Image (tube, grey):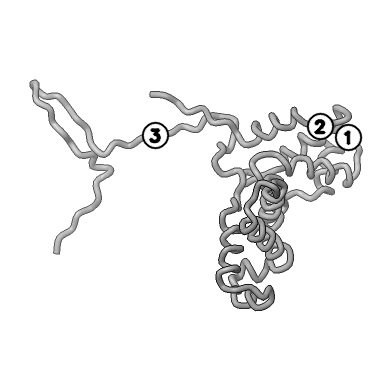
Amino acid sequence: VPIAVQESFHDFLEQQLGLLRLSSEEEYTIARQIIGSIDEDGYLRRSPSAILDDLMFSQNIFTDEEKIKALLQEIQRFEPPGVGGRDLQECLLLQLELKLEDEDELEDEELLNLKRARYILRKYFDAFTKKHYDKLQKQLDLSEEELRDAIGGILKLNPKPASGYSSGSQRSAQYVTPDFFIYTREGELELELNARNAPDLRGN
């Protein structure tokens, strides 16, 4: 039975770290600390000050929050898009910003929808999450179709960037439960349903 090798999310980020041109080994250590602080959904829930403390106590590195924020901005450009966001709003905005970097390759209508989506996330995030679409339509002076297209652009984004990656460096066991078994008895093939998979049947 083949076993699928799953690369962990943090392994994937570490590989991309090797492509950055940082000025010192200390910066790489700080960046690795940031990556290690990113959770299994792809979010950085620890504050720069907490990471600062981690570095002092575990790595004996004394730096400042500005350095941590600058390196975080580099990491937020890694794949998958949205990684390193500190909350849902930032995670979605990071994805939109990356899409908008390829502005010259976008159709005019798609570009307009993405810019509207970004504006909604920046200025009306609370109304968007509460689905106050009537309020959004009125305040943005958009038609129902224009608002729907902009919202559609947001809904295509990934709220959990790390989904699709294994949670650790170990392989995850995957088991297949068959619906039925086939046996050979005295030269005859017999099919037997897997009772564990069969639904309960009731009659009335």
Question: Earlier along the polypeptide chain: callout 2 or callout 3?
Answer: 2
Q: Amino acid at mark 2?
A: Thr
Q: Kindly state the secondary structure of the residue where label 3 is placed.
A: loop
Gap in Å between the C-alphas at discs 2 and 3? 38 Å
Residue under circle 1? 61
Q: Position of residue 190 (x, y in %)?
A: 13, 31
Q: Residues within 10 Å of mark 2 (few under 14, many from 20)?
A: some
| Mark 2 vs 1, N-terminal side | 2
Q: Is residue 12 left or right of residue 123?
A: left
Instruction: Give the camera-side residue of 51 and 119.
Output: 119
Quarter that holds the N terminus: top left
| Residue 6 pos. (x, y %) | 54, 31
Residue 52 location in percent, x, y?
Answer: 85, 43
Look at discs 2 and 1 and give the one toward the viewer.
2
Q: CA distance from mark 1 to mark 3?
A: 44 Å
What amino acid is at disc 3?
Tyr
User: What residue is shown at x 18% (from left), y 58% (from top)?
Assistant: 202
Number of the label disc, if any, that sits on residue 29? 2
